[in-house]
Image: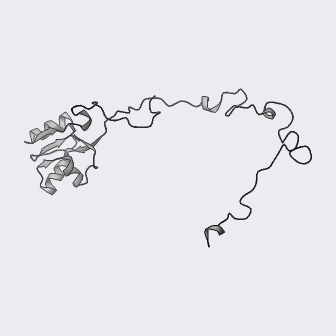
């Protein structure tokens, strides 16, 4: 089969009915629109329901607000850090180590939360940490270092780029 032999199946393409071409035959004169009235004169707006409250106005609108500048963190719990230290023997935990172990995704911001317990000394370098997680790590003899977020660096706006399209929260 060649490109010039391609064609739709017979009967698949049907030409539109040509109405309003004179009174000699079907679809002449009023062209299937009946006699007089709003619909005969082609003046009905899209979504018009004859004066009844239209569906697009009847349904409830979306409420709330999606903050386009929200900073999303990937959560890592203390028990995950404890397992990581046991299996790998690493005493320094950074986002790169967590990515290498498959705990978080690449280029994501990491926040440590306090679910679970940790008993080994570990040095943690993350973007954010909860107070209870920080106290648990320091109680175990470890240290916590916060990594500065890239949009808070010197000369930057101080907040992340807008997420969403041009119509988001306008």
Q: Quadrant of residue 10?
A: bottom right
Q: Nearer the viewer, residue 111 or 43?
A: 43
Q: Of helix, strand and loop, which mostly describes the magenta segment?
A: loop
Q: In this rendering, is residue 9 above or below 122?
A: below
Q: Nearer the viewer, residue 78 or 27?
A: 27
In reply to whether residue 27 is colored magenta, the answer given is: yes
Picture coordinates of residue 52, whole percent (x, y): 69, 27
Q: Residue at 75% of width from left, 56% of height from top?
A: 14
Say left or right for 154 vs 22: left
In reply to whether residue 166 is colored magenta, the answer given is: no
Q: In this rendering, is residue 27 above or below 57?
A: below
Q: Residue furthest front?
A: 4
Q: Residue at 14% of width from left, 54% of height from top?
A: 86
Q: Residue furthest left?
A: 141
Q: Nearer the viewer, residue 143 or 77?
A: 143
Picture coordinates of residue 24, whole percent (x, y): 92, 47
Which segment did they paint magenta? 15-31
Q: In this rendering, is residue 1 above or below 85?
A: below
Q: Residue at 11% of width from left, 50% of height from top?
A: 91
């Amino acid at each position: 089969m060649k490109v010039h032999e391609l064609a739709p199946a017979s009967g698949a393409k049907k030409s539109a009915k040509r109405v309003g071409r004179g009174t000699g035959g079907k679809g002449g004169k009023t062209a299937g629109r009946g006699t007089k009235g709003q619909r005969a004169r082609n003046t009905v707006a899209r979504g018009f329901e004859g004066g009844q409250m239209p569906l697009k106005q009847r349904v409830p609108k979306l409420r709330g607000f999606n903050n386009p500048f929200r900073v999303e963190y990937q959560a890592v719990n203390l028990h995950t850090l404890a397992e990581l230290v046991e299996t790998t023997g690493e005493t320094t935990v950074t986002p790169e180590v967590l990515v290498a172990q498959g705990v978080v995704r690449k280029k994501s911001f990491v926040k440590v939360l306090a679910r679970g317990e940790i008993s080994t000394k570990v040095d943690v370098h993350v973007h954010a940490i909860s107070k209870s997680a920080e106290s648990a790590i320091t109680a175990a003899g470890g240290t916590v270092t916060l990594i500065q977020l890239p949009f808070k660096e010197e000369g930057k706006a101080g907040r992340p780029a807008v997420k969403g399209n041009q119509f988001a929260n306008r």
